[in-house]
Amino acid sequence: MTTMTLNHRRRARTVAVALAAGALALAGCSSGGGSDPKESKEPKMESQDITLGTTADSTGPAKDLPGAKKGGTVTVLQRDAFEHLDPGQIYVSDELIMQTLYNRTLTNYRIDDKTGKVKLVGDLATDTGKSSDGGRTWTYTLKDGLKFEDGSPITSKDVRHAIERLYAPFETNGPTYLQQWLSGDGQKYRKALPDGPYKGKHLPKTVLDTPDDKTVIFHFDQPRAEVPFAVAMPNIGAVPPEKDTKEKYDKAPLASGPYKIRNFKPGKGIQFVKNTHWDPKTDSIRHQYADTFDVSFGHQWVDSTRRLQAAKGGDRNGMTFTNPVDPSQISAVLKNKEAMARSLTETQPYVDVVSINTDRVKDKKVREAIAWAFPSGQYLQQFGGPKAGEIGGGLVGPTLKGYDASFDPFQKRKYPGGNAKKARQLLKEAGKDGYELVYGYGNGDAHQDASLVVERALERAGFKVQKKEIDQTTYYTQIGKVDNKYDLYRSSWGADWPSASTVVPPLYDGKNVYNDSANYSHLDVPWINKDIARVEKLSDLNKATTEWIKLSEKIFTDEVPAVPTFYNRLFTLWGPGLGGVKYHAVYGAVDPTAVFVK
Amino acid sequence: MTSPSQATVAEKAAPAAEGKTPAGLSPRQLMWRRFRRDRAGVISAGVVLFFFAVALLAPLISSLYGKDPYTTYGLDRPELLDPLTGYPMKPNGGVDGEFWFGIEPKLGRDVLMQLVYGIRTSLLIGLAATVLSTLTGIVIGVLAGYMGGRTDYFLGRLIDLLLSFPQQLFFVAFMPVVTALFVSPQKETPTYFRVTALVVVLWLLGWMQLARLLRGQVLSLREREFVEAAKVTGASPWRIVRKELLPNLGTPILVQATLMLPNFVTAEAALSFLGVGVVEPTPDWGRMFAKGANFYEGDITYMFFPGIAMVVFVVAFNLLGDSVRDAMDPKTTR
């Protein structure tokens, strides 16, 4: 999944210079830093051990929270407006967490209220799926008593329709794992059902079968170990064929979860109210405590931090899904003991890397020199320091199963400013002293500051750096062009589920070198492509996850397609009037499903 | 900022003063004498000179002080910045014997050097735009006023058109276009290019007030007897403009120019504040405000120095402009 956090620390600056200067009459002194280390508990470097839940784990109702009350309105402050409501179109972090309120999928993640441990359980299905035929066939049985918001029952036909409509041309934004596994790589799968299910055609029974109202069977052409995770993505849910309004479904989808949509005002806000046809006995993940979730958009991080910290009026019951504490206010929040008691700092699945364009920087020694010279620690400092992330050693993040915390081949943790000496030596060996690099960066504040740090470090190592600023709003389009004219550029990618299988293939498989693809390094190396295909065929989930990690490490040391800079962290607040706030480790956001008003 | 109504009276005063000249003192000497008596004027002139001296001598200050505006001291020496928040470890923005004005949060550069070099950048741009705008204003204003008729009409409409352009919005829209035109996508946009573009835009949209003012002056001057006398004796238009008109326009030009400079400096700072002016790593006064606005909750001291400097500068320059006018034109009532 991709993050929307490109325009990281950009905020509205409406104060005129004259005003700012005039306000100085009020200026006093400021106290120094040296914050108490006790105040900043960092998340432990612990990889997510997500277990597959049993049938009992999947059976509702969810255990009641002590002290939880019904009723009340929760205010949610978000920076970016939700673009999509159609579960088939959702792929960015804030929408992923939002859809857990109204959308149910075949399986889903259950977050333990106390420990925050994640378990994959059946959601619409009674369990996480039964595999047969050596992992080529997966069978799901739907629970009894499932209903849409209009009271009509959810059947296997609705699940089939939800999957088949993903083949329609207008469904362009969601994840494509299941479609590709069923009907072919890349965009080839669309040929299996070019118009979706709308002209009466369906996928053949040898691919997707619904023998009765309660059973859904997937047939794959090779073993697929990670199907239980793929069907937890928001687009593998249920959509009734007769209520499907195609493109318009994006504004008004039918709810299957505990809340339904009311008052969606694009660009402004959205409200979620109780769905009376949702039966808690069918759901082991969600609660229905608050009456309403009132989400409003356009709150810059400064704004949401200030409001949640002050917690006045309606903000007492305020929260945010993904807005972090603004970097400029981290010190103020850390000093506020009362606010720190209602905050969390957690590692997110997102890894920030600076991709090296291997089409332009062909010499591996030069790429190694870049990796040695890169000042990851000083770079992270510009984005908010340890509260915004931790220095990355490898290409995959600590939330993945099998992550090796000691893996750091270019010693990024030891040299926060980069190891210029080693880099200079490598550059000399390659005979490329004074090598010119074009460094593209989004033109936001933090990115501009970071570009200075990068330039200084690379020039110390003997590179010449040309900095090119790129407009924030089209940043990913610009760097997504295969024939772009940059050598280095930042991007961020998060695993869709805690396995490197959702990181390594999309980012480093040669198949994925095309415009707007996430393979920003344009890496197309035969041994990598072959190895990816080999690991994809492994039917043992545990074995596959460790193989993926190993492969990612080998790609990094052997090819150096990117420099990992930091693993993202979320440091955020909520109002004192709320209980049941927990962290959704898979989506890297604050989970609203158990939130109640005290 | 401009006060055309007051300046227009100047033309009457100039010849009148000439008539009463006591023996041995030229009008210029008289003006100087009046100016010296104005204490506020002398002090603000000193302040203005000080700013120019700081801007000119920035490299010397840097070598005496032993710091430069580019080194990230705070990042290179981790004990200076709090690793958790990026703010200086010491109180008051890290002000101490080594860093007199403290260090910048996050990047850890020296604030004094940033300010000194920032003033240099802003003053250079402001001065260049002032000189260009004043020259253009004189040429077009005098031309429109003296030629009259159709020339006057068209120049007048051009001035109207340009006056209606929002300067900042224009620059925001203009910069990416010229960058794409002149800079290779492989190369960084050079600093001289940004500075030139800034000066050009400030100049193009900054000369109109002066031109309009001068046009009015010339319009009334050219009907006066001494101009007619010159015409009758067969003087060329060029000679009339140079010898008869321009000497009478000195006062409004000087006054307008002294008021224009701080305007340009603040306009440049405002553009950098918005993030479209001069970019990192070139130090810039306006960008220090932008950063200060981000940091003020954790480190208000950072905003303090550029803020005070800017207030002092703008006030001093405006007082100087007033004093110059008073000295040149003692009959003006304020």
Image (cartoon, coloured by chain):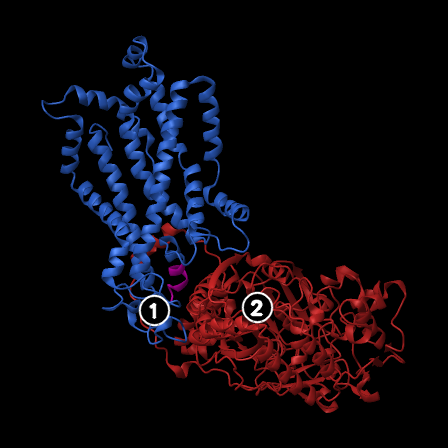
Vertical comparison of B243 with A72: above or below: above
Image spot of residue B219 (x, y percent): 36, 20
Image spot of residue A373 (x, y percent): 47, 72
Residue drawn at (35%, 49%) of the image: B122
Chain hosting mark 2 = A
Quarter holding residue A282: bottom right
Mark 1 → mark 2, Cα distance in angstroms: 28 Å
Residue drawn at (34%, 46%) of the image: B124
Q: Nearer the viewer, residue A46 or A163?
A: A46
Which residue is identified by label 2? A356
Mark seen at residue A28: none
Dominant SS in magenta:
helix
Image spot of residue A225 (x, y percent): 74, 85
Q: Nearer the viewer, residue A525 or A131?
A: A525
Would residue B205 be seen by someone viewing this image from the given angle? no
Callout 1 crowding tier (Cα within 10 Å): few <14, some 14–19, many ≥20: many
Would residue A155 be seen by someone viewing this image from the given angle? yes
For the C terminus of chain B, the quadrant is top left
Task: Give the residue furthest to the left.
Answer: B23
For the N terminus of chain B, the quadrant is top left
* Chain depicted in red: A
Which residue is identified by label 1? B73
In the rendered image, residue B295 lying in the magenta stretch gets the answer: yes
Magenta segment, which residues?
Answer: B291-297
Q: Give the drawing colour for chain B.
A: blue
